[in-house]
Image: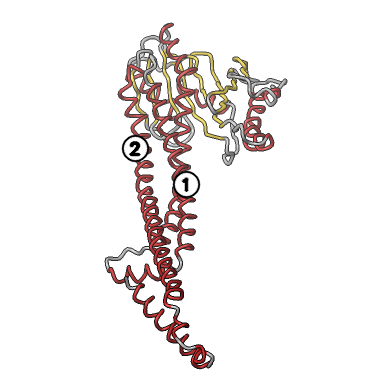
């Protein structure tokens, strides 16, 4: 049985933060985005034993990536080494820490490293905090068979804090890669030859930062959808639906519909304003949901493209099942929810179109009635049919007025039924 020994056992951790938006005020940028980063960057430098802090980051944070790097340094009161880096990537900043025991060790020694690593603990309520990801790396000594590598991986991940880890170990060209199904941690066991080490370094320094960022963003977007945006959209949709049913009820009885429409015609303006107000809120929330969906799709495509990297391409199909399928299902669910909500939006548009049509009919009727009234007074000249002497009597004038009113009422009633 092969000996379970590994070399240069290292714990890597990436912590991600959103960058501030250019349209935000400087004070808002400081409080919401930059302060949480500095709150963990400066203690991280102290962990590494750096007495001169790089506080110029605050004034030079528009500098392109990397912003600051501290190479491997012996940690105080320990036989471990630590490294620290501050980077800018796309719309985020990330801090990468490394804690390594540069020696041949047994897998259970990971517990010594986890107890000495730099603990990054930003306030989780911070709007800029996206989360963190970790990867354990080590060099395999000599030719380590798959079964022994799996035992090493099990020992390393069992010693990792938290619940028992379910993982799948993939055999790569450069060694072995373990991915935990429920935890934000990976494990890389790399062969000692130069080509394998180069591919392993490419995975750690080039691929994982981008891949972990896409995962962190997708997780953040899905949490935002489930806990905040989706309930908000449902609330606005419910209010809009209640207004639609009040103005345009779902009934097959033509008599009830006709009667309710007649009553509603007197309140068309209020109904239109109310529905339009809810519809505007609903459309705004739907736009936010579509933006969230687009972000998830972009991040999923980014992970897909990263699987084409030489360090991962040998297990591309399996990695696609492990990493991509879940995100595709999540994006599909969000897309389906939005599609159903668009039905409510379409319904509200049709109701507004119906109200507008009824308003135009109502306006046309009143225009016709007004025209007829004016015509009656001008063309019929009712008052002139009576003698001047007779109209001087008040009671006679009242009779003429009542008679004219009855004629007009009968004509208007007749028109209203048409």
Q: Which residue is mark 1?
A: 285
In this view, 337 is above or below 20 = below
In this figure, which colouring scheme has been used for the structure? secondary structure
Task: State how far apart marks 2 and 1 are (Cα).
Answer: 22 Å
Instruction: Let me know if residue 246 appears in the view.
Output: no
In this view, 221 is above or below 306 = below
* Quarter holding residue 128: top right
Q: Give the residue displayed 47% in from the left and 36% down from the top.
A: 162
Question: In this orientation, which residue lies closer to the viewer: 378 or 326?
Answer: 378
Residue count near mark 2 (Cα–Cα under 10 Å), binned few <14, some 14–19, many ≥20 = few
Question: In this orientation, which residue lies closer to the viewer: 335 or 380?
Answer: 380
Whether residue 77 sits left or right of residue 356 in the image: it is right
Which mark is drawn over residue 329?
Answer: 2
Q: Position of residue 52 (x, y in %)?
A: 72, 20
Q: Position of residue 277 (x, y in %)?
A: 49, 55
Instruction: Let me know if residue 54 appears in the view.
Output: yes
Q: Give the residue displayed 58% in from the left and 30% down from the top.
A: 19
Question: In this orientation, which residue lies closer to the viewer: 266 or 105?
Answer: 266
Can you say which quadrant of the picture contains the N terminus? top left
Q: Position of residue 411 (x, y in %)?
A: 37, 77
Residue count near mark 1 (Cα–Cα under 10 Å), binned few <14, some 14–19, many ≥20 = some
């Amino acid at each position: 049985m092969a000996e379970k020994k590994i070399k240069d056992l290292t714990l890597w951790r990436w912590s991600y933060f959103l960058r501030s938006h250019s349209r935000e005020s400087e004070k808002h940028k400081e409080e919401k985005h930059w302060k949480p980063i500095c709150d963990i960057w400066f203690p991280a430098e102290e962990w590494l034993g750096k007495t001169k802090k790089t506080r110029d980051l605050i004034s030079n944070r528009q500098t392109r990536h990397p912003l600051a790097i501290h190479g491997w340094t012996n940690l105080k009161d320990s036989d471990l080494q630590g490294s620290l880096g501050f980077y800018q990537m796309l719309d985020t900043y990330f801090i990468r820490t490394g804690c390594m025991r540069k020696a041949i060790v047994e897998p259970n020694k990971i517990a010594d490293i986890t107890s000495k690593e730099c603990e990054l603990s930003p306030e989780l309520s911070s709007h800029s905090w996206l989360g963190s990801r970790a990867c354990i790396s080590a060099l395999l000594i000599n030719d380590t068979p798959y079964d022994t590598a799996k035992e090493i991986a099990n020992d390393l991940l069992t010693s990792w804090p938290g619940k028992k880890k379910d993982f799948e170990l993939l055999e790569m060209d450069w060694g072995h890669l373990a991915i935990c199904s429920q935890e934000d941690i990976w494990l890389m066991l790399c062969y000692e030859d130069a080509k394998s080490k180069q591919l392993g370094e490419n995975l750690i320094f080039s691929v994982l930062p981008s891949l972990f960022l896409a995962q962190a963003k997708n997780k953040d977007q899905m949490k935002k959808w489930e806990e905040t945006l989706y309930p908000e959209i449902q609330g606005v949709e419910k209010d809009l639906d209640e207004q639609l049913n009040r103005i345009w009820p779902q009934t097959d009885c033509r008599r009830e519909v006709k009667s309710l429409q007649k009553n509603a015609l007197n309140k068309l303006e209020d109904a239109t304003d109310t529905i339009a107000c809810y519809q505007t809120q609903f459309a705004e929330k739907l736009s936010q949901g579509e933006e969230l969906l687009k972000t998830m799709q972009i991040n999923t495509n980014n992970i897909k493209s990263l699987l084409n990297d030489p360090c991962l391409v040998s297990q591309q199909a399996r990695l696609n099942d492990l990493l991509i399928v879940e995100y595709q299902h999540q994006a599909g669910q969000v897309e389906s929810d939005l599609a159903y909500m668009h039905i409510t939006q379409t319904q509200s548009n049709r109701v507004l179109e119906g109200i507008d049509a009824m308003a135009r009919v109502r306006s046309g009727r009143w225009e016709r009635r007004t025209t007829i009234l004016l015509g009656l007074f001008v063309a019929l000249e009712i008052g002139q049919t009576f003698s001047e002497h007779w109209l001087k009597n008040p009671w006679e004038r009242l009779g003429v007025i009542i008679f004219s009113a009855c004629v007009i009422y009968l004509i208007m009633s007749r028109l209203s039924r048409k």
